[in-house]
Amino acid sequence: MEENRITRGSGLVVVGGSAGSLDVILKVLPLLSERLLIPVIIVLHRKTSDDNILVELLAAKTKLPVKEVEDGDIITPGIVYVAPADYHLLIEKNGGLSLDASEKINYSRPSIDATFESAALAYNTQLTAVILSGGNGDGTEGLKAVKEHKGVAIAQDPSTATAPYMPQFAITAIPMDAILDAEGLAEYINQFS
């Protein structure tokens, strides 16, 4: 595990991933402190569905409350939010969450780029954005916005990813603050508990 004591604070952690990222999230969630003082937002590429199977699966792996985002929710510390299928999830400067059904970005809705970019504008230096396993370039433009606003950018170690293209593409394009495996990511997030 690499050193993950990044000194900048975090008011919000946003995690984005695609193929293979659910495996990582299922490893990280059980390791998170139940005294977590920050919210965590998860944006996964997934099939359109009306069921709550993903939320139920994630909730079974953590002591933290897990909630699928509804339009107008206010971000609350200690909650794990999950972007719903088929909507872009946007973070507002007033701490609200909004859903957008506009065109797909990078063939995806939700788009990791859209969430990271809106979060960068809302949280600036208090944002940590994490890109996980996946097979396309979604998330890299969003991570550029995070860095432009002096937030923290973290990539999953591509050697631990089922689909290493997504984190490797971001690492090639952007200077990362850390490259971590699942245990390292959990340790990083637990600094905020």
Image (cartoon, rainbow, N blue to C red):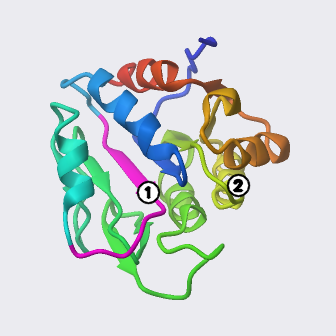
Picture layout, residue 58 above or below residue 181:
below
Mark drawn on residue 43: 1
In the image, the segment drawn in magenta is 38-50
The residue carrying pointer 2 sits among few (fewer than 14), some (14 to 19) or many (20 or more) residues within 10 Å by Cα, namely many
At which x and y percent is residue 38?
Answer: 31, 36
Looking at the picture, how far across and down is residue 8, in whole percent? 55, 27
Residue at 76% x, 41% y: name it.
168
Compare residues 162 and 118 and report the one nearer the observer.
162
On whether residue 46 falls in the magenta region, the answer is: yes
Residue 183: give x, y in percent of width and height: 46, 19
Residue furthest front as drawn: 162
Q: Which mark is residue 140?
A: 2
Q: Quadrant of residue 131?
A: top right
* Distance between the alpha carbons at the discs numbered 2 and 1: 14 Å
Residue 101 marker: none
Q: First in sequence, mark 2 or 1: give its number.
A: 1
Across and down, in percent, residue 61 comes to: 22, 34
Q: Is residue 169 left or right of residue 55?
A: right
Outermost residue toward the right in this view: 172
| Three-letter code, disc 2 | Thr
Classify mark 2: helix, strand or loop: helix
The answer, for residue 193, to whether it is visible in the render is no
Answer above or below: position of 14 versus 112.
Answer: above
| Frontmost residue, 172 versus 24 | 24
Label 1 SS: strand
